[in-house]
Image: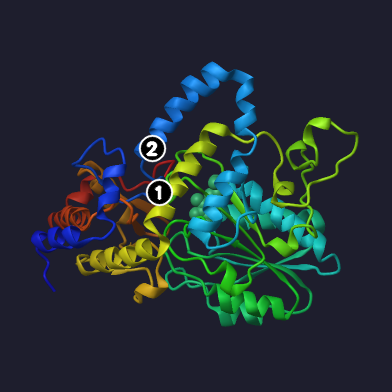
Amino acid sequence: MDLSRQYAETRDAQDPIGHFRARFHIADEQLVYFDGNSLGRLPLTTRDRLRDAVDREWGGELVRGWDRWIDLAGQAGDVIAEGVLGVDQGEVVLSDSSSVNLYKLASAALDANPGRRVIVTDDDNFPTDRYVLEGLASARGLELRVVPTDIDEGIDPARVARALDDDVALVCLSHVAYRSGAIADMVAITTAAHRVGALTLWDLCHSAGSVPVPLRESGADLAVGCTYKYLNAGPGAPAFLYVRRDLQQRLRQPIWGWFGQRDQFAMGAGYDPVESIGRFQVGTPPILGGYAALEGARITAEAGIRSLYDKSAELTSYAIRLSDGLTLASPVDPARRGSHVTFHHPQAWQICQALKAAGVVPDFRTPERLRIGLAPLYTRFVDVWEGMARLRDILTSGSYREFAAAAGRVT
Ligand SMILES: *Cc1c(COP(=O)(O)O)cnc(C)c1O
């Protein structure tokens, strides 16, 4: 294995999607950004679109802008559906945050399975998912059945299958684990859930824009995901939700807002939701964030999920090869990893601080883990080489010991 910088440069020169980096705003060429899985970079088209939307649409058109803004959540949803998730138009809409969408869809699923008393999730699911499900179980007097998961290897489908019986209403899991990047077997788990008559709800926050998502192949029922990570839509941009077409009419979400209403501007007396995916919307969608989600999804769709995923697998494998002195805390098999890779080190917090001081932005994740996100649209092989070289310097010199050992508020 060639560990020279020149090797990285050669790989970049051969990269079929390498030219996409030029479509992003790079404020500091020296900064090595390993955190596109928390907040993606700013696409240039998005910056232009937002400037125009602020000046011409909001500034000039004022309330008349709603003639064009009213369908934005569905338009962006369609690009995510076809170009990112491989499902049909009319199955995805932008709305709210992932947490709120999770609540809406989990509630709808529980209402659709009224005799059943169990929700299944796993103990390594993202905190907001566990809390939302805990709240729903508590409010409805249901059992939250929590399957144990190895935090580095990811969800074991056999363990999930053993937790299933005909009292289970809903199985709710993350497709790509936020900490280790482990990919869950959506096909096996959905098949097992359907066998006992349960619905499945998948969290795609770390999947959308980085890995192929087998919603179609698995027959998955419901999903939510953010747009500010690999879809590069910016801080606080609206999330998306997916409801398989044949379920849309059957499911009713718990917040009966006017954006789900048939003939919304008739301002009618009672709630009568549209039959389509629009019934899962609630209130006025954020238009600026919605434009950013649309532009971000367009770039991802243009590059193609297959190419993005192939590059991710190579970038994470390359980072692992350059990771002397650290223990891998992600699956070894690249086919089982998303677009980030995680390492274990007892002083991970201090190493993280030392890296930031050296111009590398990673993430710290409990317990004692260093998470390296390698967003394939704009991360180069030389970035991986450079970031890992700075990491090796920090480890061999021990300079990380000069940084405070206590964690800060945002990690
Ligand atoms: C980032 C992330 C979220 C975030 O949810 P918000 O409602 O946008 O704060 C949820 N789930 C997973 C798996 C995530 O990675």
Question: Is residue 284 visible in this depiction of the protein?
Answer: yes
Left or right: 347 as drawn, with respect to 295: left
Question: Which numbered circle lies on residue 45?
Answer: 2
First-in-chain label (1 vs 2): 2
Q: Position of residue 350 (x, y in %)?
A: 29, 50
Question: Which numbered circle lies on residue 299?
Answer: 1
Query: In the figure, 49 relative to 385: above or below?
Result: above
Left or right: 78 as drawn, with respect to 26: right
Seen from this angle, which residue lies furthest right? 269
Left or right: 53 as drawn, with respect to 333: right
Pick the residue in front: 308 or 151.
Answer: 308
Report how far apart the C-alphas of labels 1 and 2 lie in the structure: 9 Å
Count neighbours of disc 1 (C-alpha within 10 A) and say few if under 14, some if 14 to 19, many if 20 or more. many
Numbered marks: total: 2
Pick the residue in front: 290 or 39.
Answer: 290
Query: Decide: marks 1, 2 in contact (CB < 8 A)?
Result: yes
Question: Which numbered circle lies on residue 219?
Answer: none
Question: Is residue 239 visible in this depiction of the protein?
Answer: no
Q: Position of residue 230 (x, y in %)?
A: 42, 52
Query: In the figure, 6 relative to 407: above or below?
Result: below
Query: In the figure, 218 relative to 228: above or below?
Result: below
Q: Position of residue 348 (x, y in %)?
A: 31, 56
Amino acid type at mark 2: Thr
Provide the secondary structure element on which disc 1 rests: helix
